[in-house]
Image: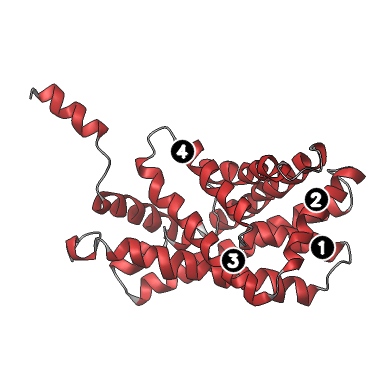
Amino acid sequence: MTEEEVDSVDERRSGSPKVVHEVIRLQGDEELGRPLASLIFSGFAAGVGLSASILAEAFLQEKLPKEPWAELISSLGYSVGYVIVILGNLQLFTENTVTAVLPLATHPTRRNLARLLRLWVTVLIANLIGTFFVALLVAHQIIVGPEQLSATLEVSRSLLRHDAMTTLMLGMPAGFLVASIAWILPNARGSEFWVIVLITYVIALGGFSHVVAGSGEAWLLWLQGEVGLSDAIGRIVLPSLLGNIIGGTGLFAVLAHGQVHGELDPDEGE
């Protein structure tokens, strides 16, 4: 093969797991070192952006006929917020269950653990404030009309079908799937949009629990007096959070790191 053909093969070849691991680890290390103010503003913007998922799903549901197949279409709206947040490089907590964990998994030091906890706490709180802000605007019909508010409440009420343990269990696949997006994107090569849409569409169809998107629904239900604050947090937000962490960090990040652990140079990334 000519040198040009070899280069062409290299361009078309997917990155090895070790290469993908290093790409994500470097991204995570960069995120861990970002200033606190940057994390807060980016996390707040992500909370606002992800709220578009619930609104888009509700708006589609409002316009579609009440037929069994309508959910197949309205669930596509759920992908909108994720496209905004992920392609916009905003700080989403569930993405950080794998991206920011790999530096710690590679070099398990107290410093890396402290950096991870700082990132997680900051981003999660900022995400939740962002979704609460949008829920407040929706509840007071500042950005939606009465029909759209009714549709958004109808979508949000689906969370009330589950108890806390069921919500936790449904949070595990959601955490795993969102974490998988971060792992897949380095090899997506121009197909990032479709990767995000496909995986988040599965989350919507499966009725899986996502702590940030679900918090927006929980806040709205609380603001409309349909659940108490303790129920919104204890039955929806906290179980989703724990499930997402188990699925994203406990399952995906551990498995993703485990498959390349033996290939890593002990001094790599230091």
Residue under the point 70% across and 42% down? 69
First along the sequence among labels 3 and 1 = 3
Nearer to me, 108 or 18: 18
- What amino acid is labelled 2 in the image? Thr
**Mark 4: which secondary structure?**
helix
Q: Mark 4 points at which residue?
A: 192
> Percent from the top left, x then y, of residue 270?
24, 62
- Mark 3 to mark 2: distance in Å? 21 Å
Residue under the point 86% across and 54% down? 139
- What amino acid is labelled 3 in the image? Leu
Residue 170, disc: 3
Q: How crowded is mark 4: few (under 14 residues within 10 Å), some or many (20 or more)?
A: some
First along the sequence among labels 4 and 2 = 2
- What amino acid is labelled 4 in the image? Glu
Residue under the point 23% across and 65% down? 261
Q: Do we see residue 42 in this rendering?
A: yes
**Mark 1: which secondary structure?**
helix
Q: Do we see residue 115 in this rendering?
A: no
Q: In this view, does 170 lie to the left or right of 73?
A: left
Residue 221, disc: 1
- Mark 4 to mark 2: distance in Å? 28 Å
User: Which quadrant of the figure has residue 105?
Assistant: bottom left
User: Which quadrant of the figure has residue 252?
Assistant: bottom left
Report the label total: 4
Q: In this view, does 104 lie to the left or right of 13?
A: right
**Mark 2: which secondary structure?**
helix
Between circles 3 and 2, the one closer to the viewer is 3
Q: Mark 2 points at which residue?
A: 152
- What amino acid is labelled 1 in the image? Leu
- Mark 1 to mark 4: distance in Å? 33 Å
